[in-house]
Image: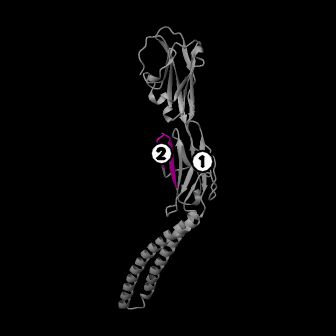
Amino acid sequence: MFCFLFLFPEGFIVTGLEGPILAPLGTALDLSCQLSPPQNAHHMEIRWFRSCYTQPIYLYNDGKDLFGEIIPKYVERTELLKDSIEEGKVTLRIFNVNPDDDGHYHCIFKDGQFYEEHITEVKVTAGSSQVQILVHPPTTKGVTVECHSGRWFPRPLMEWRDSRGEVIPAASKTTSQDGDKLFNMEITLLLRDSSFRNVTCCLWNPVTGQQESTTIVLPDEMFSWNYIWKMVVGVVLAMMTLFIIIPCIKLQILEVFVSEAQLDLDSMWLDDTSMILSMLMVILVMFISFIYFILRGHIITAKETCLGLISSDNYLGMQVSVCTML
């Protein structure tokens, strides 16, 4: 918090950069402030701080740099440029900008008991051009597609879009921060059929407006196994149903021509046949399922379409494009 100071009649004001000032990650940031009207500030106290007056990130007083008063993490990263101090202008230079430097900066000129300040807002920015899409092997539910991108600041907006630019609801979205406090993003999408085989993963920085995207076009083979599986199961069920229905119809027709004893025997035979066919149907479906998953893995691997990690390279008809904000 500010120390209480007695104010004397105003002798100057402090002006500076009007924020917000964008500071790309890893660059040097220059923050200037100056007296108005211009006057020699060589004998004054010039203090730069973030949120607490008593914790300066740079302190100059009566011609001396007071490094012992500066917060340790800024001692090696800050420099006060005083080439124009006789006109009342100084510049604070911060080297190797990182996410911790995001926020407000106070510049105070103090002459005796009189002081004035200027506050500048700084927004640290970082963006990545690496947008990767990971395609998982298809399952009976569909094809799961993951999009990854890291080292963003602040947290970017991220979504899936179809070929018309419409937003596709994501299955899940995950945000994390690494040791440098940069954001790593992950978003997944479940494609149940080929109607959304052309999808784009889009990210953009809400501060700078930087946009990055990657588009993937999945081949029809990625979805063909679902149709084959459903067709095989449908055929099996249809055949089992016919095997049960036909004897029932036959039994109804013969009911008027055979004796009651023969009818009872036929009914028992039909019951036993139905039970056996039901058990065979379950076993057959399980066997087909096992063969399906085994063959699916081998065939898709052989075609190099089961698992793909892509960025900006053309692969499986994939191409990089910049998404259009709607």
| Residue 239 falls left or right of residue 88 | left
Which residue is tagged 2? 175
Identify the residue under disc 1. Answer: 213
Residue 207 sits in which quadrant?
top right
Q: Nearer the viewer, residue 39 or 216?
A: 39
User: Is residue 126 shown above or below 257?
Assistant: above
- The residue sitting at the top extreme is 9
Verify whether residue 258 appears in magenta: no
Residue 287 located left or right of residue 26: left
Q: Residue 306 appears in which quarter of the rendering?
A: bottom right
| Residue kind at label 2, given as amino acid type | Thr
Q: Which residues are magenta?
A: 173-189
Residue 177, image x and y in percent?
Answer: 47, 42
Q: Nearer the viewer, residue 26 or 255?
A: 26
> Disc 1 marks which amino acid?
Ser
- Whether residue 55 is visible to the viewer of this picture, yes or no, is yes
Which secondary structure type mostly characterizes the magenta part of the structure?
strand
Residue pictured at 60% horizontal, 50% vertical = 214
The residue located at (49%, 70%) in the rendering is 294
The C terminus is located in which quarter?
A: top right
Residue drawn at (57%, 19%) of the image = 82
Point out residue 43 in the picture as x, y percentages from the top left corner: 52, 12
